Amino acid sequence: MADNEQQRGQASNAAVDEAPVNGLKLPAIDLKGASRSYGSRTILKDLSLTVERGELFGLLGPSGSGKTTLIKLITGLEAASAGEATLLGKRVPNRQVLAKVGYMAQADALYNELTGTQNLEFFAALYGLSGARRQERIESVLALVDLTEHRSKPVSAYSGGMKRRLSLAVALLHEPELLLLDEPTVGIDPALRQSIWAELLALRGRGITIVLTTHVMDEADRCDRIGLIRDGRLIAIGSPDELRTATGAATIEEAFIVLGRGTEA
Ligand SMILES: Nc1ncnc2c1ncn2[C@@H]1O[C@H](COP(=O)(O)OP(=O)(O)OP(=O)(O)O)[C@@H](O)[C@H]1O
């Protein structure tokens, strides 16, 4: 715990350097008092959050509570209106650090007229992958999301779930250190959902940091820690067990309801 505190302090002082400081690695994500407004409307309110490297962190909250905005703020795609966001030791937005991030947006950012393989080739080129490694990565991610047999079809002929799977494949293509996944399993059938979760847990086991948003409670239960967002505020954070114990709830769903009640005006 003391180490974490020390890491946090160092992250704020050494925000331009991701190298270990005194042998300690900086956190994957460090938000300090981050807010985001659109016009006069404040969507994220004074949010502070540290996600350690190798952690699998879930963001839960009602529709419109600010989860996507928070993910975008972490990537640097949205700038904080106040406060700061540091990713892998660097203040965002930062192009260098983005190369180490796999981001899967909620709306699939794919080229409909291109095939699955062509989409992956396009993103591989953007990530600077070439030659045998590019081929190996494309084969590997296609197999992972079970799209190998559909690789030559145009994306316009894909189902919603297939598009989600291809988006996940794109996010994993360059073997990122940090994965930011906005509702990665929406529209994906239970069997494939299980295999995607097995892969996410394996990636976490290899030290990859994963932050995902979900509305699915059994997915939340598999995370190391969960952050509950309501009206743009982080109202609770902890492991699934900690949140259940703190609320006396039997399930995460119940804990979520109890915690949400506590913030009602
Ligand atoms: N570019 C924007 N301009 C104005 N308002 C926005 C913009 N982007 C998001 N919002 C608003 O911010 C609020 C939070 O949206 P956000 O997409 O972050 O919620 P969410 O928790 O991800 O919801 P969901 O679970 O439905 O995906 C919503 O009220 C939304 O309308």
Image (cartoon, grey):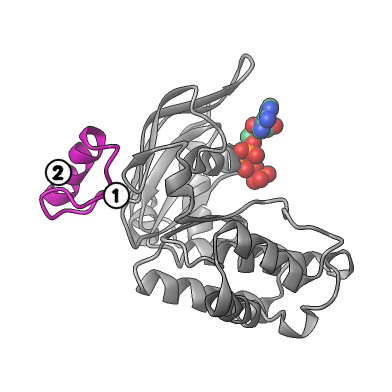
- State which image quarter holds ligand 1: top right
Closest to the observer, 89 or 96: 96
Write down the region rendered in magenta: 1-26
Q: Which numbered disc, 2 or 1, marks the residue that appears first in the sequence?
A: 2
Instruction: Check disc 2 and report the residue beneath it.
Output: 6
Characterize the local packing of mark 1: few (<14), some (14-19) or many (20 or more) Cα atoms within 10 angstroms: many
15 left or right, relative to 222: left
Residue 242, numbered label: none
User: In the rendering, at what x and y percent does residue 131 appear?
Assistant: 57, 75
Closest to the observer, 171 or 8: 171
Q: Does residue 137 appear in this view?
A: no
Kind of residue sitting beneath label 1: Pro
Characterize the local packing of mark 2: few (<14), some (14-19) or many (20 or more) Cα atoms within 10 angstroms: few
Q: Which secondary structure, mark 1?
A: loop
Instruction: Check disc 1 and report the residue beneath it.
Output: 27
Cα distance between the residues tagged 2 and 1: 11 Å
Q: How many marks?
A: 2
Closest to the observer, 75 or 230: 75
Does 9 lie within the magenta span?
yes
Q: Name which residue lies at 16% across and 53% down.
A: 24
Closest to the observer, 108 or 183: 108
Kind of residue sitting beneath label 2: Gln
User: In the rendering, at what x and y percent does residue 242 appear?
Assistant: 33, 56
Q: Which secondary structure, mark 2?
A: helix
Q: In the rendered image of this protein, does residue 171 appear above or below residue 80? A: below
User: In the rendering, at what x and y percent does residue 57 appear?
Assistant: 43, 56
Q: In the rendered image of this protein, does residue 151 appear above or below residue 68? A: below
6 left or right, relative to 148: left
Labels 2 and 1 touching (C-beta < 8 A): no
